[in-house]
Amino acid sequence: MKLFADTAIISEIEEVSTWGIISGVTTNPSLIAKSGISLVDAINKIVNLIDGPISAEVQEGRAEDMVSEAKIYAKMHKNIVIKIPMTLEGVKAVKQLTTLGIKTNVTLVFSTSQAIMAATAGATYVSPFMGRLDDFTGKEDAGFELVKDIKSVFKTYGYKTQIIAASIRHINHVDQSLKAGADIATIPFKVLQDMVKHPLTDKGLEIFREASKK
Ligand code: G3P
């Protein structure tokens, strides 16, 4: 499973780029607003930091408007993937962008039927939102079950669309993404940092430090 950074904050992307293990970045309008810069400025900076798929989200609306906006971002760099919201207009836009050879990431996916609509339209990626589904259902494994089901459906019917596990809030969601067979997990900076930590690692280091003093 590949690890993407789910952030548009440039200092965070600069930091993770030094780790050498992050192979893509996803942004959305909320993350762009939080970053304090425009989407175009963010794209221009991010493409120079991470050499991999960078998702840039168009504004939800009519398919033709989303396609026009998508073409602008797609022209900016070869690694740009157009993030399209999961609506009927979105499905139409994905179909048209696929025909043009432009990669897409269908976002706000909460069911297998949504996932196959996107995949049938030719989406490169679908993004099931684990955390938001857990919150909505009140179940800690709702997101996990969703990713697992989408994986199983894609495998059974031979869809090539890759699954980006999104709306990841904590390490357990990362573990669940792995167990469910996600192709990619897109992870907030704080959770990426937490992934290297374990209390027993800290304790072990302390023991080794003490031992090396002797
Ligand atoms: O990748 C989607 C993600 O940014 C949404 O996360 O925490 O707002 O549900 P969240």
Image (cartoon, rainbow, N blue to C red):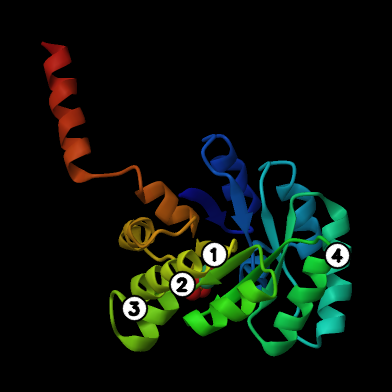
| Residue at 80% from the left image edge and 49% from the top image edge | 78
Say which quadrant the C terminus sits in.
top left
Residue at which label 3 appears: 142
Q: Earlier in the sequence, mark 2 or mark 3?
A: 3
Q: Nearer the viewer, residue 40 or 71?
A: 71
Q: Earlier in the sequence, mark 4 or mark 3?
A: 4
Q: Earlier in the sequence, mark 4 or mark 1?
A: 4
Which amino acid type is shown beneath numbered disc 1?
Gly
Q: Position of residue 207 (x, y in %)?
A: 13, 26
Spatial CA distance of label 4 from label 2 is 26 Å
Element type at mark 2: helix
Q: Is residue 201 above or below residue 72?
A: above
Q: Nearer the viewer, residue 107 or 150?
A: 150
Q: Nearer the viewer, mark 1 or mark 2?
A: 1
Residue at which label 2 appears: 153
Q: Is residue 137 above or below residue 150?
A: below
Which amino acid type is shown beneath numbered disc 2?
Val
Element type at mark 4: loop
Spatial CA distance of label 2 from label 3 is 16 Å
Q: Nearer the viewer, mark 4 or mark 1?
A: 1
Is residue 80 rendered to the left or right of residue 25?
A: right
